[in-house]
Image (cartoon, rainbow, N blue to C red):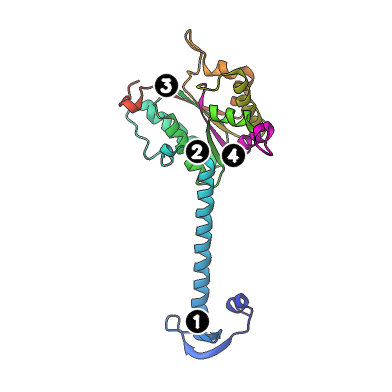
Amino acid sequence: MNALSKQFKTELVQTNQFCPKHNELMVLLIGRPVCQTCANEAYVKSQIEHAHQVNLMVREKHFAGAKLPERHKESGFKNYMVSIDPQKEAKAACHKFVQDFNSGKKRNLIMVGRTGTGKTHLACAIARNVLDKRSYVRYVTSEDMANEIATAWTKPDDNEANAIFRFTDCDLLILDEYGLHDQHESRLQLVHKVLYARYDEKKPTVLISNMTLESTEKAQGLKENLGDRLWSRFQHDGLTVVECDWDDLRFGGANV
């Protein structure tokens, strides 16, 4: 029994008609002469098209679940404009992070620098390239994450533990605006709970902040804000630090 007869679960009766394309005798299928090679080619084509549609649906689902900001849904490495060496270095570091992540080499990444330097653009470029490889990514601001966890108990069948799990379960978490509106002690503790949980599960995190890495006389730095224990854990499985130290790109700045 050939592939066509197996597909339709019936014995095929040969006709005396030849397929003009393949020059082979056709068979009767549901009362009509059919070329077995043509039918098998059409079947394979339909399977490929079906697989393609499934892939598109999965991709769309992954991208929707990532919740990238509308402004950055098309942000990628190709449309990240560079004009100075530090920008090129930042772009290269993020691109290398993606290459390593997609090949199974997981580590954390921290991007620090003043507002408007393209940090979120680069983070979303990372997200889109990781999503293309079927990994699960979630983008969220630190404030929104803390709020979702803090208010989880007000929703049916939800609680703090479930909310923390949702942010721990994704393959890559992109946590933006750390240190901006999340510094109330109780909210900051919730953010840190997620970071500790991701460390325990060996899940990498991209953390973005307007803070400087080190503390200054005027302001607390990111290292100090995270604390020694969490900073140590961030480095444990490898850490890439990208410092975006140039002027606000929204106003045409690219000076170091």
Mark 4 lies on residue: 171
User: CA separation, marks 2 and 4?
Assistant: 13 Å
Image point (60%, 39%), residue name:
170
Where residue 131 is drawn, which disc sits there?
none
Mark 1 lies on residue: 35
Q: Is residue 173 magenta?
A: yes
What residue type is disc 4 on? Asp
Q: Is residue 40 magenta?
A: no
Where residue 114 is drawn, which disc sits there?
3
User: CA separation, marks 2 and 1?
Assistant: 48 Å
Image point (51%, 45%), residue name:
64
**12 to the left or right of 84:** right
Image point (54%, 27%), residue name:
143
What residue type is disc 1 on? Cys
Asked whether residue 171 appears in the rendered view, the answer is: yes
The image quarter in which residue 11 lies: bottom right
Mark 2 lies on residue: 98
